[in-house]
């Protein structure tokens, strides 16, 4: 998606002035960088993470994947379990179909827009300001390789921190350039932090912000943790992922199989069939 199209989408979705958005961005818990930066230490850590996963060239060649396994949702102090099928293509298309006791729940993102269809048939839109970070949700490599290959992406080293009981490097990636639009809101919304194990350089987790549907100014931490790494076609892939929103555990996915580089098309991520 071009920067000009992103601006139009943002203006349509938010319906508020960019001047007010600029003031909000300056106050955000994930601050907007003033210029595009590519910190050498951050680049080194990301390069080592891709090397540890199987090599930058090999990992970068696997942009699509499908996965099957089980999912557990944590809703209203209850665990709801089912089977799951996932499809992911590049950094902007992701689909999850969960077969639950009361039917199929579909969660779909396509080019920074998305929908959720509940087993009852009720369909809920995922707004742009959340969908912008939801591509390739359970495999972190496509976003990293895209950032490394994009000179307009900001990549910052934020230091060494403890994350999920492990010593990690915190790397901030902002995929949308600062000059994509005047306020810097798109730059801020695309912010995602990667926590990379300081010993084996596995990606432990990612952190971005999600927001209420009608208020992109309000931030809630959104964390995806990765574990149970296994080799698939010589690439280390996480078979277990967990999501937490504002500290609350929302789901766990345990995969039994992953296929890298399957044939996927735009039709696999069409939203019309969910309406």
Image (tube, rainbow, N blue to C red):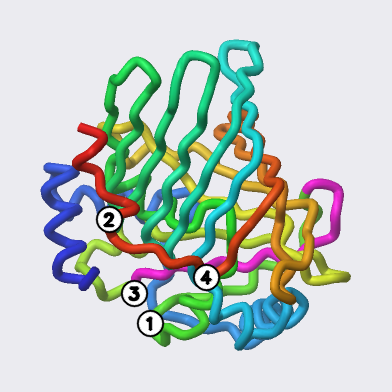
Q: Main secondary structure of the magenta part?
A: strand
Question: What distance separates the C-alpha of mark 1 from that of mark 3?
Answer: 5 Å
The crowd level at tag 1 (other Cα within 10 Å; few <14, some 14-19, many 20+) is some
Residue 62: x and y in percent read 55, 74
* Location of mark 3 (residue): 177
* Location of mark 2 (residue): 267
Q: Is residue 139 left or right of residue 201?
A: left
User: Depth check: 218 or 98 in front?
Assistant: 98
Label 1: which secondary element: loop
* Location of mark 1 (residue): 152
Report the residue at 40% width, 60% height from top: 190
Q: Earlier in the sequence, mark 3 or mark 4?
A: 3
**In this rendering, which labeled residue sits more in front, label 2 or label 1?**
2
Q: Is residue 48 left or right of residue 253?
A: right
Q: Earlier in the sequence, mark 3 or mark 2?
A: 3
240, above or below 32, in the image: above
124, above or below 48, in the image: above
* Location of mark 4 (residue): 261
């Amino acid at each position: 998606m071009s920067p000009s199209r992103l601006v139009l989408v943002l203006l349509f979705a938010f319906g508020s002035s960019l001047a007010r958005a600029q003031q909000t961005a300056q106050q955000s818990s994930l601050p907007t960088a003033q210029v595009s930066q590519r910190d050498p230490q951050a680049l080194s850590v990301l390069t080592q993470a891709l090397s540890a996963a199987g090599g930058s060239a090999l990992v970068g060649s696997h942009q699509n994947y499908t996965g099957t396994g089980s999912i557990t949702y944590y809703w209203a102090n209850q665990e709801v379990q089912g089977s799951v099928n996932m499809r992911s293509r590049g950094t902007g298309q992701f689909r999850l179909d969960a077969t639950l006791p009361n039917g199929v729940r579909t969660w779909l993102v396509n080019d920074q827009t998305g929908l959720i269809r509940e087993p009852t048939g009720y369909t809920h839109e995922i707004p742009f300001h959340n969908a912008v970070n939801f591509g390739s949700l359970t495999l972190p490599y496509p976003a990293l390789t895209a950032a490394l290959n994009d000179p307009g992406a900001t990549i910052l080293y934020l230091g060494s921190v403890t994350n999920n009981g492990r010593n990690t490097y915190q790397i901030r990636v902002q995929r949308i350039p600062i000059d994509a639009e005047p306020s810097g809101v798109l730059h801020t919304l695309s912010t995602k932090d990667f926590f990379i194990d300081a010993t084996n350089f596995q990606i432990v987790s990612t952190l971005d912000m999600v927001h209420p549907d009608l208020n992109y100014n309000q931030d809630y931490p959104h964390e995806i943790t990765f574990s149970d790494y296994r080799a698939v076609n010589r690439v280390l892939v996480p078979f277990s992922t967990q999501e937490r929103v504002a500290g609350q555990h929302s789901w766990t996915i345990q995969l039994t199989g992953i296929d890298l580089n399957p044939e996927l098309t735009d039709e696999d991520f069409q939203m019309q069939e969910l309406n």
